[in-house]
Amino acid sequence: MKKTQKRELRKHIKGCIAESLPAELERRSAPLMERVEQLESYAEASTVALYWSLAGEVCTHDLVRRAVLSKRVVLPVVTGEVMHFAEVAPDLSNLSQGAFGVMEPREGRVCDPSEIDFMLVPGMAFDRSGGRLGHGKGYYDRYLATFPGVTVGATYAVMLLKNVPTEVHDLPVDWLFTERGAYHCKETATSKDTP
């Protein structure tokens, strides 16, 4: 039942994205990423796990470009059914198109989950409790099961749902940002963080 609900939600969200103008979505992304950067847990993090956004997602490209100037940045790399994070070169020269058309670091040093202080988690939609609707492959669900750091989601308000259908393996993010506000989703989030 929940898998069917998730499939229908993904279809609906893709329709919402298709109706939006890319330039408008990109314009709304910048203040969201700035708010993420203002979190104390981000500012204090040595190693941050980010992602190179796809069309329709909150644009992370400028965040990645800024972050590599002062932090160790790792991005996801997918090989078969496994996702790991690898280091991005400061000039982004080791990025190339990988699985699902996502930019991935090639030949970057693989990062152990325990080395990552902060993770920006992608999602097609979220709810205020930190529930996340991913793309349906389960890569982040499997990775987050053992990830000890702070997790943050960022989404457009139109993709903030009343309730995301979740299953036992679906883990909420600690913080969620939209252009309309910030939500502290889990008690495990660093208490010193304020949006």
Image (cartoon, rainbow, N blue to C red):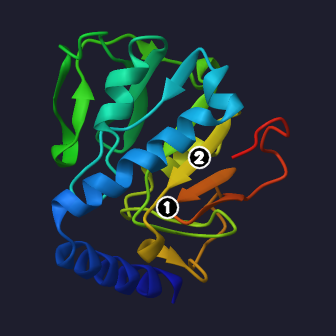
Q: Name the amino acid, label 2.
A: Val
Label 2 sits on a secondary structure element that is strand
Up-down relation of residue 78 to residue 128 (above or below): above
User: What is the crowding at mark 2: few (fewer than 14 residues within 10 Å), some, or many (at least 20)?
Assistant: many
First in sequence: mark 1 vs mark 2 = 2
Please provide percent x and percent y for residue 118: 60, 31
Please provide percent x and percent y for residue 70: 47, 11
Q: Which residue is mark 2?
A: 152
In this rendering, position of residue 181 left or right of residue 194: left
Up-down relation of residue 13 to residue 28 (above or below): below
Residue at screen point 33% across, 77% down:
13
User: What is the crowding at mark 1: few (fewer than 14 residues within 10 Å), some, or many (at least 20)?
Assistant: some
Q: Nearer the viewer, residue 161 or 157?
A: 157
Can you tell which of label 1 and label 2 is closer to the viewer? 1
Q: Name the amino acid, label 1.
A: Glu
* Residue 45: mark in rendering: none
Total numbered circles: 2
Please provide percent x and percent y for residue 52: 30, 38
Please provide percent x and percent y for residue 45: 63, 20
In this rendering, position of residue 43 left or right of residue 161: right
Quadrant in which residue 57 is drawn: bottom left
Residue at screen point 32% across, 12% down:
108
* Residue 179: mark in rendering: 1
Residue at screen point 60% across, 73% down:
166
Label 1 sits on a secondary structure element that is loop
Up-down relation of residue 119 to residue 174 (above or below): above
